[in-house]
Structure formats: C-alpha cells, structure tokens
Image (cartoon, coloured by chain):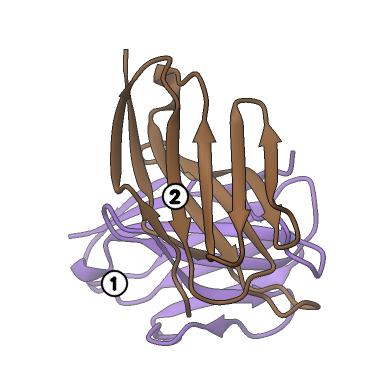
Chain colours: A brown, B purple
Amino acid sequence: SQQGEEDPQALSIQEGENATMNCSYKTSINNLQWYRQNSGRGLVHLILIRSNEREKHSGRLRVTLDTSKKSSSLLITASRAADTASYFCATDEGSGGGADGLTFGKGTHLIIQP
Amino acid sequence: GAVVSQHPSRVICKSGTSVKIECRSLDFQATTMFWYRQFPKQSLMLMATSNEGSKATYEQGVEKDKFLINHASLTLSTLTVTSAHPEDSSFYICSAGRGRWVTEAFFGQGTRLTVV
C-alpha cells in the first residue's frame, strides 16, 4: 500500500507564526485527511479534502490539494502553544462502495515556542 | 461528534499471557472498525479491518492467529494479543467508521501495551 510522506519531520516556530506542513502520496486517492496527535493520545481528525477539491478552510487551518503533483499542505495560521502536536496526513485509496483503512504518513512533529 | 472508547488505556502484562483490548462506538453504529499499531515516532500502521459479523481482513505481515479480532456487534470490536512477547509492546489504536463509505474515521484513545 502507498504511504503518505510529510515534510518536514519536525518543525519548531514561534507562537503567532504560521506553520506549513506538506504531504506527498503516490497513487490515486478518494480523499486526503489530516489528523493531529497529542503525545500519547489518540488521533483527532482535523480536516478532510476530497480529490475534486483544491482548497479547504476550517478555523485557523487551511488545506490544499494538488492531485497533479500528488501533494497536500496543511497551514496553521497564528500558531499557539496548544498547537504543539504531531500532525499526520492520511489517504483514502478506497475504490468506493467499501470501507478501506486509511494509510498514514510518518507525521510532522510541530513545536510552538511560547 | 462521534465517540469511540478504547479500553484499557494502558496495560502491562507478562510474556506468554494474552491481552484483550476493547473498542466501542458509544453513540453510533460502527459497521467497520480498524485496528492500527504505532511504533514509537512512527506512523500508524493498519493491522486489520473488521466488519460486524464477519472475519477480519488482516494486512500483509500481520499474524491473524496472534492478533485475534472479534467484531461481534455494531458497537464493539476487540483485539486480543495472544501469547504476548516484548516485541508486541506498542501503541494500539482502533478507529470506527460510520456506514459503508468511510469518509471520516473516529479514533479511540489508544492502548499502550507493555509486555515484560
């Protein structure tokens, strides 16, 4: 199965700055999702973007998807210390009509310096 | 939002024993549940997909006789790690999907398994 790859693997910025994380994948997808994981906790779904969408917003989050480049980016604006976490992209390669598991990337560990 | 409860959150067991992890969807019927494993500082790896009332589908390389999955009802799936070994120590997370089309996955809190 394919695996999304996020870059950078780790990112440290000052509070108030914007954080951008990228994700690349290899095959066709139905949708791409971004998840957040605080240390030792379960994943929290942040946002889903479908393959026919190019950009989506949710609060301080902005996600883009470029299917021609097989890449996505997650932008967190006006970062806060509480945004410190690991962020994973996940691709849904399901052929439709069924429930396929998601394929996750390795994640980006984001640290917001107060 | 949909709530998925996973229990226990932490468990320590001795080598050779079996451990059962439960995953419950509290406010919706989960036709499909997924079990993931996460090694330290690595991404989640899908272990198996279970549909209510049928046998689980295991990913390549996952031993089905070692990781027993039961999805007996629309709200409960269990993962039993049999004859646990220290290398089975890991973070296990379940997720539940609503309906036939999985457009969102709702995750449990995860279980930290340590085999000593």
- Find numbered disc 2 in the image and state the secondary structure of the residue it sits on: strand
Residue at 21% across / 69% down in the picture?
A: B87
Which chain is indicated by disc 1?
B
**Front-most of residues A100 and B111:** A100
Q: Which residue is mark 1?
A: B84
- Which picture quadrant has residue B98? bottom right
Residue at 43% across / 87% down in the picture?
A: B60
**Front-most of residues A54 and B74:** A54
Position in image of residue B32 (x %, y %): 70, 68
Give the vertical position of A46 relative to A100 (above or below): above
Label 1 crowding class (10 Å Cα cut-off): few <14, some 14-19, many 20+?
A: many
Q: Left or right: where does residue A97 sit relative to residue A72?
A: right
Q: Amino acid at mark 2?
A: Asn
Q: Where does the C terminus of chain A fall, quadrant-wise?
A: top left
Position in image of residue A9 (x %, y %): 29, 48
**Front-most of residues B31 and A9:** A9
Q: Which residue is mark 2?
A: A22
- Find numbered disc 1 in the image and state the secondary structure of the residue it sits on: loop
Visible residue check, residue B108: no
Position in image of residue A95 (x %, y %): 72, 80
Q: Left or right: where does residue A92 sit relative to residue A97?
A: left
Which chain is indicated by disc 2?
A
Residue at 47% across / 64% down in the picture?
A: B36
Give the vertical position of A13 relative to B88 (above or below): above
Q: Left or right: where does residue B12 sit relative to residue A36?
A: left
Answer yes or no: do the residues labelled 1 and 2 have beta carbons within 8 Å? no
Give the vertical position of A30 relative to B11 (above or below): below
Q: Amino acid at mark 1?
A: Ala
Q: Nearer the viewer, mark 1 or mark 2?
A: 2
